Structures are given as C-alpha cells and as structure tokens.
Amino acid sequence: MEAPAAPHSPADPASVGITVDSPEEMRALGRRLAALLRAGDLVMLSGELGAGKTTLTRGLGEGLDVRGAVTSPTFVIARVHPSLGDGPPLVHVDAYRLSGGLDEMEDLDLDVSLPDSVVVVEWGEGKVEELTDDRLQVLIHRSLGDAADTADEVRQVTVTGIGRRWADVDLGVLTA
C-alpha cells in the first residue's frame, strides 16, 4: 500500500494507490470508500472485464447500508438500491453496452438522481464526466499471473479525486 498523497488543489487532483490481494479485500476497500461518500457523489469505475468493479461496488453498498444484492447491472443498465437507514441511495450503472455517450446516459436521468444519491458508473469514461465537475475516478488494474500462483487475484487500484469536492478529502484513509 502506498502512502497518502500530499495536500492538493482542485486543479491538482489527489490520487492514492492501493494493492488489493483478494475479492474480500476489494469489498473491504468499497466499505472504506463508502465512508467518504455522500449524496451527490459520482464514482467512475474503470478496469478490464473481471477486474473487480462490481465487487468494489458490492462493498460500497454494504458500507452505505443499502437494500438489495449489489450485482452487475450489465443487462438492465442501472439499478437503484434504496438506503436502509438515513443515508443516500446507491445508483449502480453499467455503461458497457452504451455507446452514445452522455446522450444515452441522459435517458437514465442520472442528472436527476445525482444530487440525492451516490452514483457509481462502471465503464463510464467519455460518457458521464459532464454530469459534474466533481467525481472520483477509480482505476482497477488486474495483474495476470500464471495458473500456479495467486497473482491473478492481485489488483492495483488507483483512486483519484477530481474537483473541489475532493480537494480536502484524505484519500489516504483508503489504504488502511
């Protein structure tokens, strides 16, 4: 695990790198990340197929205490998980099958959901950045090892806070 980044300005986004060794650790990272999130936050998840985007989102759902099993919304595009308490709902979007950029995303009314929800978008690069100037970008890189070792479960996760919302947030707490 890397040390937290130095203080930053909105023009110089904060970034932290985390090594994740198992799906359980990915879920735990999601729970830690949930503690930093609030209504109005947009989280963009990037990484190849099987990298752990949905596993991370499952941990977010646990940390946000939302209703329903968090599973990949690939075929339904988006799922809303209402809060079981007084926290924000989780809107989980899989933009993998969408090719029309923000125009197609507008059909999902994410701009309406965003102020009151935590919106997590898998495969959202080039599709949702215009929703807000403030967002977290999470890049999950999957290491590929040979079948005889466990390197294929290791992930390198980079979390970058973009915009004023994240200027004073210590992303270093995610490395715990």
Image (spheres, rainbow, N blue to C red):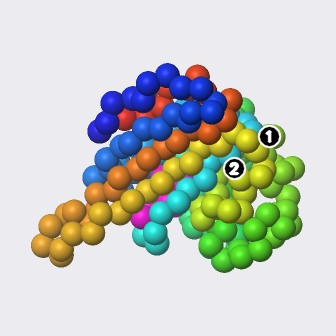
What amino acid is found at the position of numbered circle 1 in the picture? Asp
In the rendered image, the vertical position of residue 114 relative to residue 124, given as above or below: above
Q: Is the magenta stretch mostly helix, strand or loop?
A: helix
Q: Position of residue 33 (x, y in %)?
A: 51, 39
- The location of residue 123, given as percent across then percent down, is 60, 65
The kind of residue tagged 2 is: Val
At 38% across and 42% down in the image, what residue appears? Answer: 17
Q: Quadrant of the N terminus?
A: top left
Quarter of the rendering containing residue 77: bottom right
Q: Is 67 within the magenta?
A: no
Q: Is residue 132 above or below residue 52?
A: above
Secondary element under disc 2, as helix, strand or loop, is: strand
What's the magenta region? 51-59
* Residue 162 rendering spot, x and y as whole percentages: 62, 39
- Camera-side residue: 30 or 103? 103
Which label sits on residue 70? none
Q: Where is residue 76 in the image (x, y as percent from the top left)?
A: 70, 73
For mark 1, what is the residue?
116
Asked whether disc 1 touches disc 2, contact meaning CB atoms under 8 Å apart, the reply is: no
Q: Name the residue under label 2.
A: 119
Q: Is residue 140 left or right of residue 37?
A: left
Left-right relation of 18 to 159: left
Assess disc 2: are there few (<14), some (14-19) or many (≥20) residues with their C-alpha within 10 Å of its C-alpha.
many
Q: Judge from the rendering whether residue 77 lies leftward or rightward of residue 1; answer left or right.
A: right
**Image quarter of the C terminus:** top left
The residue at 71%/76% (across/down) is: 99
- Report the residue at 72% width, 57% height from top: 128
- The answer for how far apart the CA atoms under marks 1 and 2 are is 9 Å
